Amino acid sequence: MFGNFFQKTLDVIKTLDETLMVKPLDHIEKERLEEILIEADVTYDLVEELLEELPNEIEREDLEPRLLSCFHSTEISLEKKPLVQLIIGVNGAGKTTTIAKLATKYKSSGKRVLLGASDTFRAAAIEQLKRWADKVGVGIVYSKQGHDPSGVTFDAIKSGVAKGVDNIIIDTAGRLHNQVNLAKELQKIVRVAGKALPEAPHQKILIIDGTQGTSAILQAEKFNEIVGIDGVIITKLDGTAKGGAIFSIAEALKVPILYIGIGEKADDLVEFEPKNFVSGLLDKLYKGES
């Protein structure tokens, strides 16, 4: 799993220092490690924090716990029925495709799934989600372009409850006329979801385009200020050398990274496991694996 979505970052590291990747190393000089992490798009401030007070020759056992400390676990119960997830993110981040992947994952585990097309700002968004619903074989609640997105959210949740579905996944608009409109709309959707079903939405999930690297952090922080993010899904990491931004995003938001998108197919979504991720990176750095 690690090599699939992080290979381009590893290629950058390999180009940076060919000897690093072919010779077994017990330690790495701090200056070299700083350069490696920054090239992988870990923010400079975080690199400085991670390596603070470490010796000039850094061993794996010194670095591993610090890298793991960037990640946070979730305390949200996923046993709710129906489990309502609100999907948030800018246009182009891969929201609709990610919703299809989540629906596929849930359906393959025997769950009944319903989608809510609450991105009524763009007709194309509604049509795209409808096509995915047909392709995946799940239900969808939608309206016409320009209709009240919170109304669609309300109808989707009520319909899901009535039909006894297990998962309700709500799409939202990524960009309106300005940030104030976007904030008000998302906040209203959250309020209305709670009226349709107490405690809903149970998860507000932010979709981040992995090719943006650390530039996605400011965007993520804005969404977090607007509605409070419960988890992150990072897309398009199969096509970027900026995989190190995962550390910076997790540290900045203090919320768990739930999944990684590694392709366009409906099943190209893998659960993010921090220990495996960090271990895979350190295997490359300290064991010289190709």
Image (cartoon, rainbow, N blue to C red):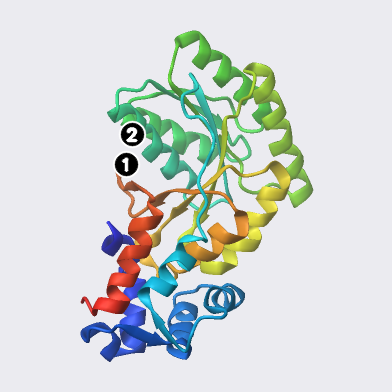
> Residue sitting at 58 percent across and 72 percent down?
46
Give the quadrant of the C terminus: bottom left
Give the quadrant of the N terminus: bottom left
Q: In which quarter of the image is residue 60?
A: bottom left
> Residue sitting at 65 percent across and 30 percent down?
149
> Residue sitting at 61 percent across and 42 percent down?
173
| Above or below 89: residue 68 | below
- Left or right of residue 71: residue 289: left
Q: Can residue 233 be seen in this view?
A: yes
Frontmost residue, 73 versus 132: 73
- x then y, percent, for residue 45: 61, 76
First reached walking from the N terminus: tag 2 or tag 1: 2
- Left or right of residue 247: residue 149: right
The answer for how far apart the CA atoms under marks 2 and 1 are is 6 Å
Q: Does the CB distance between marks 2 and 1 fall below 8 Å?
A: yes
Frontmost residue, 12 versus 58: 58
Q: Mark 2 points at which residue?
A: 104
Q: What element carries label 2?
A: helix
Q: Residue furthest right?
A: 180
Q: How crowded is mark 2: few (under 14 residues within 10 Å), some or many (20 or more)?
A: many
Q: Mark 1 points at which residue?
A: 266
Residue type at mark 1 is Ala
Residue type at mark 2 is Thr
Q: What element carries label 1?
A: loop
